Amino acid sequence: MKRIIIKISGEALAGKDGIGISPRVVKNIAKEIKAAYDLNICEIGVIVGGGNIFRGKLANEMGIERSSADYMGMIGTILNALALQNSLESLGVDTRVMTSLNIPEVAEPYIRRKALSHFEKNRIVIFGGGTGNPYFSTDTTAALRAAELGASIIYMAKNGTDGVYDRDPRNNPEAIRYTRLTHKELLEQQLHVMDSTAAALCRDNNIAIYVFDMNVPGNISKAILGEDIGTLINNKEE
């Protein structure tokens, strides 16, 4: 059974407001992940961002030093991970939250072998706390965990964007969506699917990336089943 990572932005958990955690939205996302889990074709890890709790722009306005701001963002990802865990468990899905920051009262510390054991027991594992170090994004966390745990692909569940375009589709109605790209093209064209550190990690470890719109019901399952609803990025030339 293949192992996958689903990357969800923090903003996606907030709904239309973009701030805080929306119980309705989190429940809907949990239902979508459960539907994918029920396919019984892959082991699922989830990385959540923290932009709905704390953003870099806010840190700049408050005069917060970068390292402190990043740690605040990491704590935000743990809040999101716990919210998603409880929604999944209310649907009957066995779930574990593992964090790179040590908060044993609320979640397990991230230990690679323990995470692998959870996968073997058919549990969904949600990773909070980023990498545990400042100056790294949750995109990099997704790439790092995928490499460490042997995941073959990262599903980048975008909030309202159905793939990778040659131009910004919000400003250019004639923008063309790519169906396939290579990691080399992603980096050379600076397409901003994920930060360059994460993209390079995926390239060097032969981890595919699939970008799709998570706001369409059923899309997580469709992406996993290989339906053409987004953009696939890997090391294979067309």
Image (cartoon, rainbow, N blue to C red):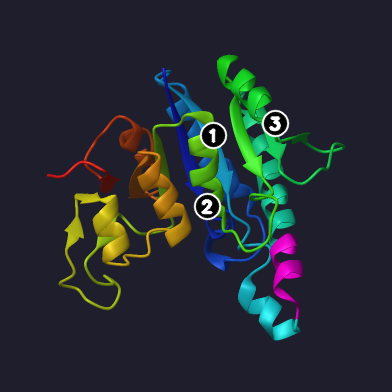
Q: Percent position (x, y) of residue 103?
A: 83, 42
Secondary element type, mark 1: helix
- Locate residue 162: give its quadrant: bottom left
**Mark 1 = which residue?**
148
Q: Specify few, some or many for label 1: CA neighbours under 10 Å numbering under 14, 14-19, or 20 or more.
A: few
Quadrant where the image shows the N terminus: top left
Say whether marks 1 and 3 touch (CB < 8 Å): no
* Direction from residue 139 to residue 56 in the image, left or right: right
Which class describes the residues within 10 Å of circle 2: few (<14), some (14-19), or many (20+)?
many
- Residue 140 placed where, x, y %? 52, 52
Q: Decide which of 124, 112 is in the foreground and name it.
A: 112
Residue identified by numbered label 3:
111
Q: Which residue is mark 2?
A: 140
- The amino acid marked with disc number 3 is Ile
Name above or below for residue 94 compared with residue 45: above
Give me the C-alpha separation between circle 1 and circle 3: 10 Å
Q: Amino acid at mark 2?
A: Thr
The residue that appears at 43% across and 61% down in the rendered structure is 196
Secondary structure mostly taken by the magenta-highlighted segment of the chain: helix
C-alpha separation, residue under disc 2 versus residue under disc 3: 17 Å
Q: Residues within 10 Å of mark 3 (few under 14, many from 20)?
A: few
> Is 86 displayed left or right of 123 in the figure?
right
The tag earlier along the polypeptide, 1 or 3, is 3
Residues 165 and 132: in front is 132
- The reply to whether residue 172 is in sight is yes
User: Disc 1 residue type?
Assistant: Glu
Instruction: Give above or below for 197 relative to 7.
Output: below
Residue 152 appears left or right of 108: left
